[in-house]
Image: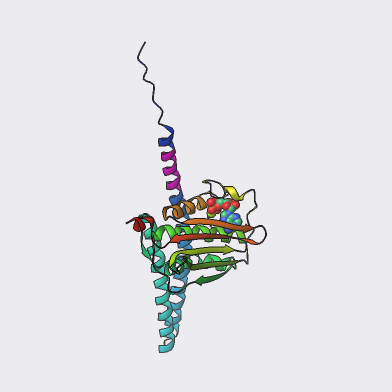
Amino acid sequence: MPDTHPITPPDAQTQITALKNQVRHMQSLASLGELTGTATHEFNNVLMTVINYAKLGLRNQDAESRDKALTRILAASERAAKITNTILAQARNRTDAKEPTDLVALINDTMILLQREMQKYRISVDTELAAGLPLVPVSGNQIQRLLLNLMTNARQAMGEGGSLLIRLAPVFDASGQTVSVELTVRDSGTGIPADVLPRIFDPFFSTKSGPDESGKGGTGLGLAACKEIVDEHDGKIRVESSVGRGTAFIIRLPIQSQQQAAA
Ligand SMILES: Nc1ncnc2c1ncn2[C@@H]1O[C@H](COP(=O)(O)OP(=O)(O)O)[C@@H](O)[C@H]1O
Ligand SMILES: [Mg+2]
């Protein structure tokens, strides 16, 4: 009888680590897929602007009209460049490098990507972004992904004509020092029922039947990715929700990373 070599099963911890890595990889592919879809639409929108103003400039040769056309074309092209840069940065996946980041600028850049989509669903977007905040050590890619996930969920929870608030504010300690920043994404959508709430951060948990008409949602990976991103930044994420009234995701990110603090 031939020798049998029992295959030793990988221990549970190794398996868990491998599966976690797979989930992480799927999260980034899912986000990239959604982002590419959004960006293509936005890009097309920008191209329409460029084409229309180029036509206008050719039709009206007076200096004033041409200046106006060229100014609009320049602005649209700059927007297009930002969109491309975002996609390239995400695709290169330089996810883990944390750099001192101007979160207000990051939020504004990210909103460019969802502007058209929000307009399409007649969602009014308000921002309350505190001026003069210190730079925050984050991975810009990851925080952008977090924002896109939260804003997309918000949009999907609202249907037509809701309102979305993006707020960024300092958090002070007892001595008045800014110790962290608080980012709030608040929507006027359906809210989350109490029995669903404990599960929303679980990977693959979704109440959506599949991607919507803009190709987003249904994977159940969005909030799992958000949670992971916040954890990697030594931050905290919590949710306040009220059925029929809306939902807010509130994130705190420390200004000084734990590594820095330990140094
Ligand atoms: N802003 C929100 N309003 C209402 N429900 C939400 C909101 N964000 C998330 N959810 C709920 O949490 C679930 C998980 O979200 P997510 O991980 O992004 O997966 P997906 O969007 O693919 O369903 C959603 O299916 C939805 O039920
Ligand atoms: Mg989602």
Q: Does the segment drawn in magenta span residue 22?
A: yes
> Residue at 42% across / 57% down in the picture?
142
Q: Position of residue 99 (x, y in %)?
A: 35, 62
Choose between 81 and 221: the one closer to the eye: 221
Nearer to us in this view, 257 or 55: 257
Q: Name the image quarter holding the N terminus.
A: top left
User: For residue 9, what is the image quadrant?
Assistant: top left
Residue 122 horizontal/vertical position (percent): 60, 68
**What's the magenta region?**
16-26
Looking at the picture, the colour scheme in use is: rainbow
Give the farthest residue toward the left: 263
**Residue 226 included in the magenta stretch of the image:** no
Q: Quadrant of the C terminus?
A: bottom left
**Residue 136 against residue 22 in the figure, above or below:** below
Is the residue 121 above or below the residue 58 in the image?
Answer: above
Residue 19 in view in this figure: yes
Q: Is residue 37 visible?
A: no
Of 170 and 107, which appears nearest the observer?
170
The percent position of residue 98, horizontal first and vertical second, equals 36, 58
Taking 195 as reference, is 225 left or right? left
Front in this rendered view, residue 101 or 147: 101
* Residue that protrudes farthest toward the top in the picture: 1
**Helix, strand or loop for the magenta stretch, by majority:** helix
Residue 152 drawn at (x, y percent): 53, 59
**Residue 257 position by quadrant:** bottom left
